[in-house]
Image (cartoon, rainbow, N blue to C red):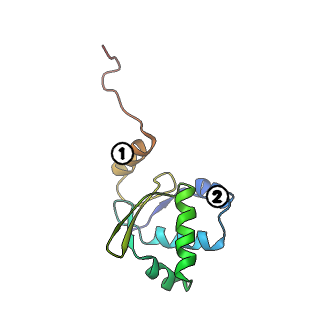
Amino acid sequence: MKTALVNVQELSKLSCNGLNASDLRVMYSLIARLDDRNLVRTTQVEIAQHLERHPITVKRSIKRLIECGFIIECWRTGRSHTYKLNPNYCWRGSDDDHIRALMEHRRWCVIEGGKQD
């Protein structure tokens, strides 16, 4: 089983930012389901069943996680959702991919050679 790298310091800022216990449980459930590209493919009903919560509660929690920046993208395919989690908070995958994801998320760029004409 692969483990996810979690930035506890950054996550603690989220928990102080108006997230409730249900939101945090949904967050941890998403972290546990990460694939190697920091994506989670699941349905809100599956999360609700796993957490023994009502699907509406999960839907509201996901909305708050999007608003606070933990989930940075969300799209649907049929009934399933795919969530892209913020690489500043957690990551599962290679170190090189993590650096690329951080740079993409922060919109950084590397200039080769040090000078531009």
Q: Which mark is residue 72?
A: none
Q: Provide residue 90's location: percent of width, then percent of height.
A: 48, 58
For residue 10, above or below residue 112: below
Q: Front-most of 12 and 3?
A: 12
Q: Residue furthest top?
A: 117
At x 47% / y 69%, what residue is drawn? 30
Q: Provide residue 92's location: percent of width, then percent of height.
A: 40, 61
Residue topped by disc 1: 100
Residues packed near mark 2 inside 10 Å, few (<14), some (14 to 19) or many (20 plus): few
Label 2 secondary element: helix
For residue 28, above or below residue 101: below
Q: Which of the marked residues, 2 or 1, is nearer the chain's N terminus?
A: 2
User: Contact (CB < 8 A) between labels 2 and 1?
Assistant: no
Whole-Å distance between the Cαs marked 2 and 1?
24 Å
Label 1 secondary element: helix
At x 35% / y 20%, what residue is drawn? 114
Q: Front-most of 104 and 5?
A: 104
Considering the image in quadrants, where does the N terminus appear? bottom left
Q: Front-most of 23 and 11?
A: 23
Considering the image in quadrants, where does the C terminus appear? top left
Q: Which mark is residue 12?
A: 2
Q: Quadrant of residue 8?
A: bottom right
Q: Quadrant of residue 4?
A: bottom left
Amino acid tagged 2: Ser
Q: Provide residue 45's location: percent of width, then percent of height.
A: 45, 81
At x 49% / y 85%, what residue is drawn? 49
Q: Provide residue 5's location: percent of width, then percent of height.
A: 47, 59
Amino acid tagged 1: Arg
